[in-house]
Amino acid sequence: MITTILLVLVIVYLFRNTLSDVSVFNPFAEPEVREEPIVEGKFTPETLQKYNGTDDPKIFIAVKGKVYNVSQGASFYGPGGPYENFAGRDASRGLAKNSFEAELLTPINKPIDTLKDLTDAEIESLDGWEEHFENKYPIVGSLHENGETGETGQ
Ligand code: HEM
């Protein structure tokens, strides 16, 4: 009897990976990691604004038309962080010019910055930051002109 039980346990142990694919209750299954789904969305400067770590705990920033979820970098972009001005905003010009001053941010109600006047060095700097963001943070959407997505900033 004991031998049979042991044999069954050994078989179950050996096939635990196969068993874990079966969706019925299975004590060998890895616990499911529940991560928030990455939602591809269309943002405008108005709808992006609330993702600043205060109005909404999530922090999104836009770089060259793409919107990144930088919530894991809350110590940089969250309230009181050194780059909090970027939270919920298009940070492209500031990153290009290596400045986090608020005056480099395009006002929320103005058209999206075309960045056409940047120098080669500034474009290079911005591209470097873009690579940094792409490697570090998930993209959650893209930036569009106010009104284009049919949503308001409310
Ligand atoms: C006073 C000079 C500055 C110092 C001492 C400084 C220091 C730092 C440090 C220590 C990091 C973390 C690096 C890492 O762990 O990966 C960092 C990241 C960063 N810095 Fe600065 N910084 C300065 C100026 C600036 C300026 C002017 C900007 C404006 C564009 C800037 C934008 C950033 C950004 C965007 C990150 C990346 C944060 C992330 O990974 O999400 N920094 N900085």
Image (spheres, helix red, strand yellow):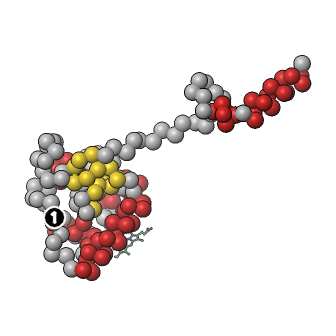
Observer able to see residue 95:
yes
Residue in the foreground of this view, choosing between 102 and 136:
136
Answer yes or no: disc 1 within 8 Å of ligand 1.
no
Q: Quadrant of the N terminus?
A: top right
Left or right, 27 with respect to 153, comes to: right
Q: How many marks?
A: 1
Q: Few, some or many C-alpha atoms within 10 Å of disc 1 (few <14, some 14-19, many ≥20)?
A: some
Residue 9 percent coordinates (x, y): 79, 28
Observer able to see residue 54:
no
Residue in the foreground of this view, choosing between 50 and 125:
125
Q: Is residue 151 above or below residue 4?
A: below
Q: Amino acid at mark 1?
A: Asp
Left or right, 68 with respect to 112, comes to: right
Q: Which residue is at a point 52% across and 40% down the rendered structure image?
A: 33
Of all residues, the one furthest to the top in this rendering is 1
Q: Which residue is at a point 31% across and 64% down the rendered structure image?
A: 83
Q: Quadrant of the C terminus?
A: top left
Left or right, 75 with respect to 61, comes to: right
Q: Which residue is at a point 16% across and 45% down the rendered structure image?
A: 149
Left or right, 149 with respect to 28, comes to: left
Q: Is residue 97 above or below residue 144?
A: below
Q: Which residue is at a point 70% across and 34% down the rendered structure image?
A: 16
Residue 92 percent coordinates (x, y): 24, 66
| Ligand 1 occupies quarter | bottom left
Residue at disc 1, secondary structure: loop
Residue 144 percent coordinates (x, y): 18, 53
Q: Is residue 98 above or below residue 74?
A: below
Residue matched to label 1: 113
